[in-house]
Amino acid sequence: YMCALDADGRRRDLAERPELRLGAVEIIAPSEYMVRPPQPPVFLFVVEVSYTAVSSGMLRCMAATIQHTLDRLPGGERTQIGLITFDSTLHFYSLDGGAPAMHVVTETDEVFLPQPHDLLVNLSEHKETVASAFERLPAMFANTQSTEVALGPALKAAYQVAQHVGGKIAVFSCSRPTVGEGALRNREAAGGKGNTKEGQTTSLLRPDTEFYKTLAVDCSKQQLCVDLWCCHAAYADLASMGQLPRFTGGSTYYYPNFSDVEQGEKLSRDLQHNLTRLQGLEAVLRVRASRGLRIANFYGNFIIRSSDLLALPNVDEDKAFAVEIAHEETVLSSSSACVQAALLYTTTEGERRIRCLTMEVPVTSALTTMFESADMEGTVSLMSRIAADTALNAKLLDGAERLQSVCMDVLRNYRSLCPPQAKNTSQLLLPESLKLLPLYSLALMKSALFTQTSEIRADERSYMLLLTASMSCFQATSLMHPRLFRVHPPAPSSTPDGLPPPLPLAAHALEATAVYILDDGLALTLWLGRGTPPQLLQNLFGWPSLDGVDAASLRLLPPNASAESAEVNRLVETLRGQRTWGWMPLRVVKQGVADAPFVRALVEDQTKQMMSYAEYIAHCHRYVLSKVS
């Protein structure tokens, strides 16, 4: 890789080698980077067909979505597909004939395949049979009364079906597993709803069995990724089942109290996005740093093969990984340092590639320069992952205290670097790049991750922990600190992207005669004040009054119904267009009626457990002054 230098001391082939002058390059990997032929895209659907799955509408919604997404699955003529359903027994489907054939296996203690081959078929060759199987699925189990669920045996069967090739296993669950290996007990009921005691709350965030982690490790070795779709009406023990996506590079989707009527569109759109998004197969990720630096920790959904190598059976456009870098030497001798991430993966078209991301950053001995260069979203995202990891390994309170400690230390260290004349002021000194750090820290401590309240169920908290581990910086800040906009009366001005000016997340910003919309990155909430004008309600929903009306059942009228409806629909679509990681449903709530999640999002207000933003700023200031003095 040597080359002669020109008169300026630069390589003569610099213009011909993009990897030497660009921060992001993709290289077609030679044959020595392959231990087998490139993996084809494989989709194996493992679907619960119990009474709960049928009555909630999950089975119908899932089957209809997959049936209409078959033509858009990546991979072309290489794509393979399979189907397993389960209740208290396992059902396998032969899809290689003119019509689908079902094989029932009642043995769940020692799982075996009814036929060793042909449970995965080429989609392009058997598309009509596959489509017919999903079309018939809801009718086949329409009259089922089974309430027992053998999820563990179904997963082991799926592993046997796909272990020779790898791929993606999509698991759809509506009930807590009760039969065979992987059966889970109702730990939440044992401690009471919400489990507000610290010890009980923390124990519910840890897996109750090693079965799911052990299976996830086996799946990762065979390049199998597991996506988990939870549509449970009761406690599911997501902390245990969530080990599957956590260690296989998968995704977790959570729809509490699922109803096809209210959440069907959300599940359908999420499933379409999951199946068709840009993704890489059988990947490994290696991160390197310059001499004097070392990789201290990784955060995300993966298994660590060695000190700097992550195993990723599947990697997609929505995943993010955090890397914590520490100093190995007290002083770095060079004027700059480099960090490089190299991802070896297979495209869905069957091409083996290496994507190299390289960043060179200057080295400085001036801490003030480092503060000025800090990235707010990156800092907060890393803090949230570290705090979540602390909470899982210790207690929730320890995670919240870790957040507060980091925030306080940043403010104290920055003030100690300020010139003497600046220190004489009684104001809290904040670096411009991190001026929102106290607000984000407080918001995260008030989030579902750390708040001690019976309103937050164990599964919801576990879902937030799983989500925090793999979401992007933009999604992390959106979830911590939602955006609040006034819909009516309309604001006199708007931002360049066509949105009203954002409002502070505090009750004083709300009026009982107005309508607001809250965007937390996962859902949109339309909040109707008690005094909302009847004519506005008529123009938005077709109802002059909401007395006796369940707000959750309300649907916006189409844009051509009225000028107000057109404006709200435009605002909703604009907000949805800014969130690329998933589709956000619109929920309608009335002031004072089932609006607790909306009120909880007002993070600048005081709560029973936490101080307001103004009080927290004052608390930070007193702490910093006491330490600096």
Image (cartoon, rainbow, N blue to C red):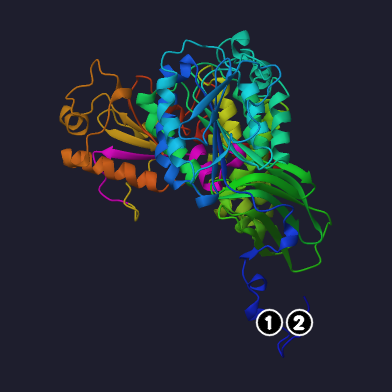
Which residue corresponds to mark 2? 3
Q: In this picture, which residue range is highlighted in magenta?
A: 468-494
Q: Quadrant of residue 16?
A: bottom right
Residue under the point 67% across and 20% down: 182
Q: Quadrant of residue 536?
A: top left
Residue nearest the viewer, comparing 280 with 93: 93
In the shown orientation, is residue 333 left or right of residue 590? right
- Residue 452 shows up from this direction: no
Tag 1 and tag 2, C-beta contact below 8 Å:
yes
- Quadrant containing the C terminus in the rendered view: top right
The disc at residue 13 is 1
- Residue 613 shows up from this direction: yes
Residue 440 drawn at (x, y percent): 54, 40
Residue under the point 34% across and 36% down: 517
Q: Secondary structure at mark 2?
A: loop
The disc at residue 171 is none
Q: Is residue 383 magenta?
A: no
Q: Secondary structure at mark 1?
A: loop
Q: Is residue 492 magenta?
A: yes
